[in-house]
Amino acid sequence: MTEQSSSEQKDPRAVKPEPLLHVTHLRAYLSSRHGVVKAVDDVSFEVGHGEAMGLVGESGSGKSVMSRAIMGLMPRRSDRTGSVLFKGRELIGLPRKEMSEIWGPQISMVFQDPGRSLNPVVPVERQLTEGMRRHLGLGRSEARGRALQLLREVGVSDPERRLRNYPHEMSGGMCQRVMIAAALACEPDLLIADEPTTALDVTIQRQILDLLRRVQRERNMSMILISHNLPLVAGRTDRTAVMYAGRLAETGSTRQVFESPRHRYTAALLAATPTITHERHSPFRLIPGTLPNPVKPPAGCRFAARCDHFHGPCHELGPDMTPVAAGHHVACADPVPAPAAVGARGGEHDGR
Amino acid sequence: MAGSGTAHLRGEDALLSVRNLVVEYHTDAGTVQAVSDVSFDVLPGETLGIVGESGCGKSSMGRAVLRLGGMTSGEISCAGERIDRADEKTMRALRRDMQMIFQNALGSLNPRRHVKEIVAEGLAIDGVPKAERDRRATDMLEEVGLTPERFSDMLPRQLSGGQAQRVAIARALALRPKLLVCDEPVSALDVSVQAQILNLMEKLKPEFDLTVVFIAHDLAVVRSVSDRVLVMYLGKVCEFGDSVEVYDNPVHPYTRALLESVPLPDPDRPFTGSPLEGDVPSPLAPPTGCRFSGRCPAAQERCARSEPEIREVLPGRFAACHYPLAAAADLPDPDARAAAADRREPQGREHEPTGRRPEGA
Ligand SMILES: Nc1ncnc2c1ncn2[C@@H]1O[C@H](COP(=O)(O)OP(=O)(O)OP(=O)(O)O)[C@@H](O)[C@H]1O
Ligand SMILES: Nc1ncnc2c1ncn2[C@@H]1O[C@H](COP(=O)(O)OP(=O)(O)O)[C@@H](O)[C@H]1O
Ligand code: SF4
Ligand code: SF4
Ligand SMILES: [Mg+2]
Ligand SMILES: [Mg+2]
């Protein structure tokens, strides 16, 4: 799936055609007051070595639950089935102790809210060095030196001073940089960034996105960049997966997905997304309605109730994706014809 | 004074006029000047978009305009009435003409009331008889695309975010206000639902003859709804002008940096220009001179010393910057410029890149 076969220096065995991460039929069900939430419901995809994949979808589509399901960070009352192969090793069913050896040096995560993953009562130095000392067996001064180097790498000015800071003494953008530094500290092969800039201002968001893409490329690391904001992943990723109501709607190269979306949902979502060039006072293309109830998702295509191309076979549609072009897959019974000529349809407001 | 000055005002014709508005908060850590000497006008039927990063004072300003939050000094008039001076009785009458909708629509609805009662809330305060209230509430639900039969008797917690925002809009418009202030009305909504609300607002604006102040941090959204746009940074006005012109050809370096930070849905061109460095400074200790000077790629020595006053840089375009981006060649011919300046008091200064003139502030 990926052209760049990366980690020669790091791990010679990794030079295999096999993807770094291979997820098949992943389901993550969570129990809630209203019943079992089918947050992730039969999802399959791969991430290649050194590849950046964007995972997009509206809020509630299951992106965060999926990333946590991959990491094995599931809430207590939950059920996870399917397969998550990481470097050929099955992570589902792995005891927590073995999983904790993977968090950090193999897979690490950056969250939307730095407050939730930076410990408020621990200074930056310890947040950065703890993992390195544990996983890489570095001594104190060695770890400190690397921490300084990491902070410089993520664009933190005056890193010596920052090492003594507590999270509340730093701005949101600065916390997010420190979190990225912490996530990179143990040289992970896969970084999962879940809405890493959603809480930040646009100018800072821009800085963080540039930073993530730069380190991902420089380190030849794989990355899953998760966002509800489609344009945000467009220039930052090699491939893009579109998620809707617990399932994947479309996967393809980022260019394919953005330039010729084939799933009706992707096309509609792109058309509804405000862009800086949208003509003033002109209506946006609408997607009527809202996400289906994740406790009782409809049979067949989950987008059916909102799709204007809905017809009989859509009710029969399963979760499997079919290829529409090389490396481009959709789960849609009536895909947009290629090359995407998505007519901008009217903007009558929907009368629900 | 970056962002002060009055060159961009349009005076008598305005429905809403804000002059030298200052909003301060006194905190344990010191005094924050959230809005620092801001002036603007909104003409009848116009939509003014207000953009800027978090903490630049957008909400504080929106609240002050409707007297829902405090103000330290300044003048605010709506339809000729001085809001800042109005007594409670006058204010009650004025409230009918000025309504606000918020980001957290659900939180702004009384959780124990049915949708129909919520929409009729203002009408009840106004003393409209029950039967008339019901009829108007039903009409309003219809207007905002909520089937009255289905939604009238629902409680807020049964509504989705988009539906709650529709109810908030129906409630605000039931009183037929002249002015609607919207503070991040679609920021909490998903793209697909956001498009529904934006289209609804475009439909309602002419129908209700609305003048709108639309506050949002999403630049694409603001451009789509606004006729004019006001760009703010750390409590100050940076730039003001026609929204399409400002977006197509920003003259203030901050406006440009903001626009260049918006991701484009284009795999080849994720952003338009180079990124801005540094962080937004603390509002407790704003930089001296131009507040943007610490991060501005165009900054020169003078910028940290003296605050630029707002002035007309291009016809109808105002910016508070010593070195606006429009090249001298882009400026209109001197006659047109002089004519434009004559129409306005005080006069807009000429573009003067060398900055040898004495400071006006
Ligand atoms: N009640 C308050 N007490 C103290 N400081 C406040 C209060 N409300 C706002 N501020 C401060 O005033 C400044 C402006 O805040 P305001 O909420 O108006 O910004 P904003 O532009 O609406 O930001 P956002 O985009 O995050 O909504 C900020 O520095 C903020 O921390
Ligand atoms: N801890 C939880 N318990 C029950 N339901 C949850 C929990 N976390 C998320 N959900 C539900 O799972 C679905 C997917 O959520 P999430 O993965 O957070 O979406 P996204 O990240 O795409 O916005 C939603 O319906 C959400 O309400
Ligand atoms: S499967 Fe049918 S209903 Fe679903 S997106 Fe495709 S055309 Fe629309
Ligand atoms: S050029 Fe000077 S005055 Fe203009 S925005 Fe930059 S720092 Fe401010
Ligand atoms: Mg999420
Ligand atoms: Mg605000």
Image: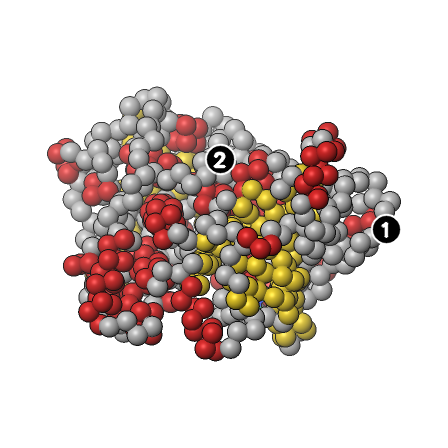
Task: Judge by depth and name the residue closer to the eye, B1 or B176.
Answer: B176
Visible residue check, residue B358:
yes
Q: Chain of mark 1?
A: B
Q: Nearer the viewer, residue B89 or A196?
A: B89
Residue that numbered label 1 is attached to: B358
Q: State the image coordinates of residue A261 (x, y, percent, origin top left).
A: 35, 30
Relative to B180, A138 lies left or right: right
Dividing the picture into quarters, in which one does residue A23 lie?
Answer: top left
The foreground one among A268 and B312 is B312
Res B125 → quadrant:
bottom left
Which residue occupies 56% across, 73% down?
A: B85
Q: Is residue A31 above or below residue B45?
A: below
Residue designated by label 2: A277
On screen, B146 above or below A335? below
Type of amino acid at the residue the image marks with label 2: Thr
| Quadrant in the picture for residue B170 | bottom left
